Amino acid sequence: MSRVQGVNERDWKLFRSKLPDWQENYMDKLNHEYMEILNGDGNPSDRFWALEERIRKDKRDTGVVVRGASRSNMLENILALIREGAIGVEDLAEFSEELRETVKMFVERNGV
């Protein structure tokens, strides 16, 4: 397998193919959470501003937008997606054992 910057070609292609679906699923989850905010208790203005603050925070998440999706930061992006709850370790089942083990090590070591 071809390796560039520590990531094999198969894992890189798989990441690029899965990322759009992961992001769509994450944004669907966020949309449901936003509806809960809007349908919650309190003044309409308070709910509006709570939603605005939440969207401002969430729009920087990797699950919404990936900045610099390159091989060199693929692992960083995967870990961010896990940390945000956009994906779980189980979503990496099709990736190489080497990548899964590396992710597992980071998750266990850093409590991602």
Image (spheres, helix red, strand yellow):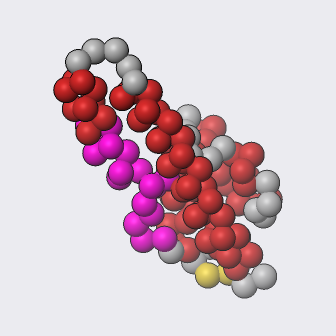
Compared with 15, 53 (above or below) is above
Compared with 112, 68 (above or below) is below
- At horizontal 35% and vertical 51% (from top left) the residue drawn is 59
Q: Is residue 109 located in the magenta-colored stretch of the structure? A: no
The quarter of the image holding the C terminus is top right
- At horizontal 72% and vertical 50% (from top left) the residue drawn is 91
Can see residue 83?
no
- At horizontal 70% and vertical 79% (from top left) the residue drawn is 9
Location of residue 37 (image quadrant): top left
User: In the rendered view, does 26 fall on the left or right side of 18?
Assistant: left
**Residue lying furthest top in this view?**
41
The quarter of the image holding the N terminus is bottom right
Can see residue 55?
yes
Location of residue 65 (image quadrant): bottom left
Residue 28 in percent (x, y) is at 54, 46
Q: Which SS does the magenta portion mostly show?
A: loop
Q: Nearer the viewer, residue 63 or 104?
A: 63
Q: Nearer the viewer, residue 4 or 43?
A: 43
User: In the rendered view, does 32 fall on the left or right side of 67?
Assistant: right
Residue 42 in percent (x, y) is at 28, 15
User: In the rendered view, does 94 fall on the left or right side of 63?
Assistant: right
Location of residue 75 (image quadrant): bottom right
Q: Which residues are magenta?
A: 53-69
Residue 107 in percent (x, y) is at 61, 42
Residue 60 in percent (x, y) is at 35, 52
Compared with 73, 44 (above or below) is above
- At horizontal 24% and vertical 24% (from top left) the residue drawn is 44
Q: Is residue 63 located in the magenta-colored stretch of the structure? A: yes
